[in-house]
Image: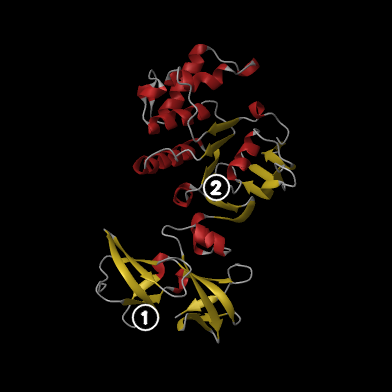
Amino acid sequence: MKVALQNLTKRFPGRGRGAKDVIAVNDFTFEIPDGKLIGLLGPSGCGKSTTLNLLCGLQKPTSGRIFFGDDEVTKLPAEKRGVGFVFQNYALYPHLTVRQNIMFPLENLKGEQKMTKAQMQEKALEAARLVQIEELMDRKPSELSGGQQQRVAIARALVKRPRILLLDEPLSNLDARLRLQTREEIRRIQRETKITTIFVTHDQEEAMSISDLIVVMKDGVVHQIGKPQEVYDKPVNLFVAQFLGTPPVNTFDGRVKGGKLYIGDEAVLSVEGADDQAVYVGIRPEGFVPEKDGALGCGLVRVEVMGRDVSVVCTHGAAQNTSVRAIIDSDCEIDEEADTVRFSLKPGKVHIFSKETQQRIDCRLFI
């Protein structure tokens, strides 16, 4: 099911005398392709959950239109939209068994859609098999782990075979290992069912790992839409660059002068296609290469061994971050007793941004 949002805006009235209205979603226009998994990504308060509530009908937009396929659903009640919704806190009925929780949406069907009890049980078992919890059907939610409860919530959302599936931070209550396992399950289920899915999260690693496309939002405004790797490699502005990536991008004050990119007093790369100006320089942690005669010198703080990789924690006078973090291969040798460490930079992992607009400057960087 293709989903289209046209100039979607949600404004909440300000509270208190003289308080300004809050625009939670601001002129959001986007078409979600049929059968794709889309990640809505951004910091708390960016408008991603409000967008989900507008899609499912829990809230009405101030302006704009919503289409499911060729059908406009902007004013359609939530129960008639054919949406499956998985909440952050599972929202299971504690007095019902897993089977009864999954069957619950089917019991409310009326008219031609109404099912017999045998049909409902068959559909519930089918949904349970999809999320691999068929052996838990007679348990109560209190007898399940967090991951199992989340699977029950997903099965309940899928049992009606909704036109679209909405997931509102469904993994935030799980521990790290279970989050990894469950997000892989969500991707598997989405590919098997081919249901158009919108996944809301503030965790950029989650969004990038399972989404076909990601939408990066801030303060109700969409900043960038694209494939996860493309957005990571070519952020449109400094906010997107800083939000995506773990560890985050290292940001420096710099300048372009005479075809060279300077950080502090050091010319670190050559530049083609950028005017002389003050800039912000973003360097991904994997963009540093330790070299004795490297162009960029940093004060060495410590070296952290992380198995496959090594994290070199440094300082630099032009850095906006408290510390600079470089991720290098474990076979690279660093003198941990030294006061400084020098790096050459990978041009493809370096971005420059206008100081005035914070937009990425489209230019060629090279050694």
**Residue 203 image offset from top left, x and y in percent:** 47, 49
Residue highlighted by disc 1: 294
Q: Quadrant of the C terminus?
A: bottom left
Residue 194 in the image: above or below residue 115:
below
Residue type for callout 1: Gly
Identify residue type, mark 2. Ser
Q: Position of residue 121 (x, y in %)?
A: 47, 17
Q: Is residue 1 left or right of residue 263?
A: right
Q: Quadrant of the N terminus?
A: top right
Q: Which mark is in front, 2 or 1?
A: 2
- The residue at the point 45 percent across, 48 percent down is 206
Residue placed under numbered mark 2 in the picture: 44
Determine the image quadrant of residue 359.
bottom right
Q: Residues within 10 Å of mark 1 (few under 14, many from 20)?
A: some
Please tell me which of labels 2 and 1 falls first in the chain. Answer: 2
Is residue 201 depicted above or below 134 in this figure? Answer: below
User: Which residue is farthest bottom?
Assistant: 258
Q: Residue at 65% of width from left, 15% of height from top?
A: 111
Asked if residue 200 can be seen in this view, the reply is yes
| Element type at mark 2 | loop
